[in-house]
Image: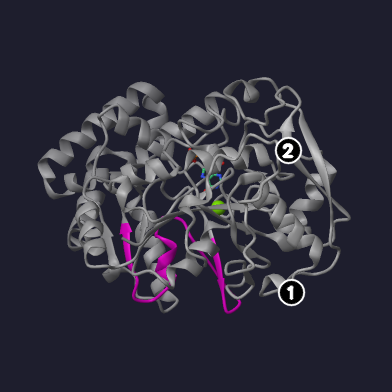
């Protein structure tokens, strides 16, 4: 049963969009399993830039079936806006879309709650994307959320909206909810949702059933993770995390599938590291050096435009991401951003822990990274299309990542274009099987190795 999962191995923005777009070619269905319009997946096709937030990146490949699983939170305005934008650019999207009836909806009240929280804490505790994601998931867990299926029963929906309105008014105050204007009136919110119901109804499909039947019919399914492992609600740098599960295990929940259907899990990692929003970041560069790397890598948020914090690759975090999602293969992106560096530091462990693990306490204790410096290659990799085209030091860098994580690097990205990709598979695959003698962190055996890209 060919199901491939792509998960982010860092704090999001690893370049999953490009990788999913590449892999989508050889799949029939592309499914989002978690998150909402907080994501920003950027793909460059023939010099044209596309950014999708809520739709699966497979939307950019004509003919692919697109699914939003029950784990996704949906903002209908964002969804219709994105469909309109892509259809305006000549891509048929809506007729390909399947939306799970159990997916929760993001309401204007969720954004109001989030804004109130940010204001109360002066600029925000977490530095969220402001899309109402956290409050929507919080209400889901508190069992007061609204699901897609609820749009089909108008009277019940009106009651649910009125209850949420009352709850939010109690939390943020009469004045704050009035300041939001007539659009936040429960009647207006219900009417707006119900007006969308007719359009949505033909798209509503049980995604668990859809994918199970597709797999049984030997169709190929690609699961597009959003955000990254270190933003996972359970396993990330809590509380500086998103409100959903971003790992392979969570993807199964968010789609309604069992683990036996997964044939490969690919982790996507940038050749260095970035994070948007607040929270620990042990390998973060000081401001001037961070600004230089940010400019080279164009590291500004695709969803909020915020400058991303920048630092060096953290192998401790990467090994952890590979372990948590059981990743069998890696895609290393933005290798070209390091092209001109004379030396490239990578964090191999933290001072407090010789075993090279990332413990929960590591985040609290302001961990001090121990770096290994690798020689740079100081030549452009943009034109490389095979391993043989890469300068030896760039190849060594990828080999080091494979050895340190214990999994092969299946592809490397050397530019934002679809074609700017190095396929590392085949007999010369950069392979993590060798490892370093004496090191204990070979979490992933070679037994489950995936077919080469
Ligand atoms: P939220 O997901 O909007 O609640 O934001 C929570 C944290 O996750 C913030 O630090 C955000 O910057 C971060 N975040 C959420 N989505 C993404 C993403 O797609 N890429 C990078 N960071 C993200
Ligand atoms: Mg992004």
Which mark is first along the chain, 2 or 1? Answer: 2
Q: Is residue 157 above or below residue 78?
A: above
- Locate the N terminus and report the quarter of the image it occupies: bottom left
As drawn, the label of residue 348 is 2
Q: CA distance from mark 1 to mark 2?
A: 27 Å
* Whether residue 283 is visible: no
Please state the horizontal and vertical placement of residue 29, each as a whole percent of the image.
33, 65
Left or right side of 238 for 139: left
Would residue 68 be counted in the magenta stretch? Answer: no
Residue shown at 24% from the left, 39% from the top: 146
Q: Nearer the viewer, residue 109 or 312?
A: 312
* Coloring scheme used: one colour
Where is mark 1, residue-wise?
Answer: 389
Camera-side residue of 441 and 434: 434
Taking 327 as reference, is 212 left or right?
Answer: left
Residue 60, magenta (yes or no) = yes
Above/below status of 320 relative to 206 = above
In this orientation, which residue lies closer to the viewer: 119 or 51? 51
Is the CB of the residue bearing disc 2 within 8 angstroms of ligand 1?
Answer: no
Determine which of the numbered discs, if any, sits on residue 210 in the image. none
* Magenta-tinted stretch: 42-67
Residue occupying image coordinates x 57% and y 37%: 320
Task: Give x and y (percent) for residue 13.
Answer: 58, 51
**Relative to 392, does residue 108 appear above or below in the rendering?**
above
Q: Residue 160 sits in which quadrant? A: top left
Q: Is residue 374 visible?
A: yes
Image position, residue 411 (x, y; %):
60, 64
Dot 2 alpha-carbon crowd within 10 angstroms: few under 14, some 14 to 19, many 20 or more: many
Q: Determine the secondary structure under disc 1.
A: helix
């Amino acid at each position: 049963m060919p199901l491939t999962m792509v998960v982010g191995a860092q704090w999001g923005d690893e370049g999953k969009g490009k990788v999913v777009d590449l892999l989508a070619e050889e799949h029939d269905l592309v499914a989002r399993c978690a998150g909402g319009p907080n994501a920003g997946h950027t793909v460059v096709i023939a010099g044209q830039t596309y950014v999708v937030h809520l739709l699966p990146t497979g939307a950019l490949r004509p003919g692919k079936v697109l699914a939003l699983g029950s784990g996704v939170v949906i903002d209908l305005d964002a969804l219709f806006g994105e469909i309109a934008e892509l259809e305006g650019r000549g891509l048929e999207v809506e007729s390909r879309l399947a939306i799970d009836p159990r997916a929760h909806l993001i309401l204007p009240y969720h954004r109001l709650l989030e804004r109130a929280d940010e204001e109360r804490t002066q600029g925000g505790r977490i530095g969220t994307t402001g899309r109402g994601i956290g409050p929507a998931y919080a209400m889901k867990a508190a069992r007061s959320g609204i699901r897609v299926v609820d749009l089909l029963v108008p009277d019940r929906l009106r009651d649910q909206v009125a209850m949420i309105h009352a709850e939010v008014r109690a939390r943020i105050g009469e004045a704050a909810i009035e300041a939001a204007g007539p659009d936040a009136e429960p009647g207006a919110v219900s009417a707006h949702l119900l007006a969308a119901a007719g359009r949505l109804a033909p798209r509503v499909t049980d995604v668990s059933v859809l994918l199970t039947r597709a797999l049984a019919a030997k169709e190929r399914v690609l699961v597009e993770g959003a955000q990254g492992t270190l933003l996972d609600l359970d396993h990330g740098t809590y509380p500086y995390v998103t409100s959903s599960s971003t790992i392979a295990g969570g993807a199964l929940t968010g789609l309604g599938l069992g683990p036996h259907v997964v044939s490969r899990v690919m982790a996507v990692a940038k050749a260095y590291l970035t994070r948007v929003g607040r929270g620990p970041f042990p390998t973060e560069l000081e401001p001037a050096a961070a600004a230089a790397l940010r400019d080279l890598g164009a590291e500004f948020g695709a969803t909020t435009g915020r400058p991303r914090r920048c630092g060096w690759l953290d192998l401790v975090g990467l090994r952890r991401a590979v372990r948590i999602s059981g990743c069998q293969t890696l895609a290393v992106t933005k290798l070209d951003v390091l092209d001109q560096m004379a030396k490239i530091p990578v964090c191999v462990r933290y001072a407090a822990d010789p075993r090279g693990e990332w413990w929960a306490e590591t985040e609290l204790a302001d961990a001090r990274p121990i770096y290994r410096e690798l020689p740079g290659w100081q030549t452009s990799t943009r034109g490389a299309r095979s391993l043989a085209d890469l300068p030896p030091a760039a190849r060594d860098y990828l080999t080091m990542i494979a050895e340190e994580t214990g999994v092969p690097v299946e592809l490397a990205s050397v530019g934002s274009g679809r074609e700017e990709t190095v396929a590392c598979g085949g007999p010369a695959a950069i392979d993590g099987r060798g490892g370093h003698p004496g090191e204990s962190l070979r979490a992933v055996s070679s037994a489950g190795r995936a077919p080469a890209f």
